[in-house]
Image (cartoon, grey):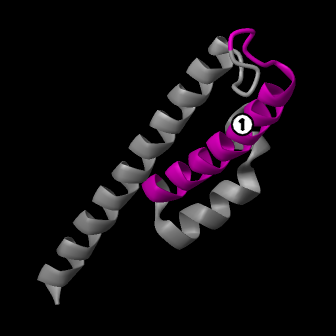
Amino acid sequence: MGIFDEKRAELERHEFMMGVERGRLAVALDLLTDSLILVGQHGVYCTSSRNPSRPALDLQAVLSGMEGAKALIQSVMEELKKSREQGSGRRE
């Protein structure tokens, strides 16, 4: 089963509210956020041997990459929103 089947209801709801592109990005953000939470919880148990108050280095790298991806998706959503607002502003 693919992601489009698994998340059909969420995709339909977000695509209806935001348009196809922004709706799919919103669902991707939700997936990333859920994954970040799970990795963060895992980091509580898999701590760094050098600094027990921090997650293991591999988890730190995964968290950093996921947070970066989330920031990029958010920036694309903002650009799409600006583009749509500018496009609708010209037509009025």
| Residue depicted at 46% across the width and 35% down the height | 68
Q: Identify the residue at image location x=58%, y=48%.
A: 29
Left or right placement of residue 12 versus residue 78 in this view:
right
What secondary structure is the magenta-colored segment mainly? helix
Tell me which amino acid carries mark 1: Ser
In which quarter of the view is residue 17 placed? bottom right
Residue occupying the point 71% across, 23% down: 55
Residue farthest to the bottom, as pictured: 92
Where residue 42 appears, x then y in whole percent? 82, 27
| Residue tagged 1 | 35
Locate residue 58 relative to residue 42 in the image: left or right: left
Quarter the C terminus occupies: bottom left
Q: Is residue 88 above or below residue 82?
A: below
Q: Secondary structure at mark 1?
A: helix
Q: On the picture, is 15 further left or further right than 11? A: left
Magenta region includes residue 33: yes
Q: How many marks?
A: 1
Quadrant in which the N terminus is drawn: top right
Residue 36 horizontal/vertical position (percent): 68, 38
Q: Which residues are magenta?
A: 21-50
> Residue 77 at x, y = what percent?
39, 56
Answer with left or right where residue 71 lies relative to residue 2. left
Q: Residue furthest right?
A: 45
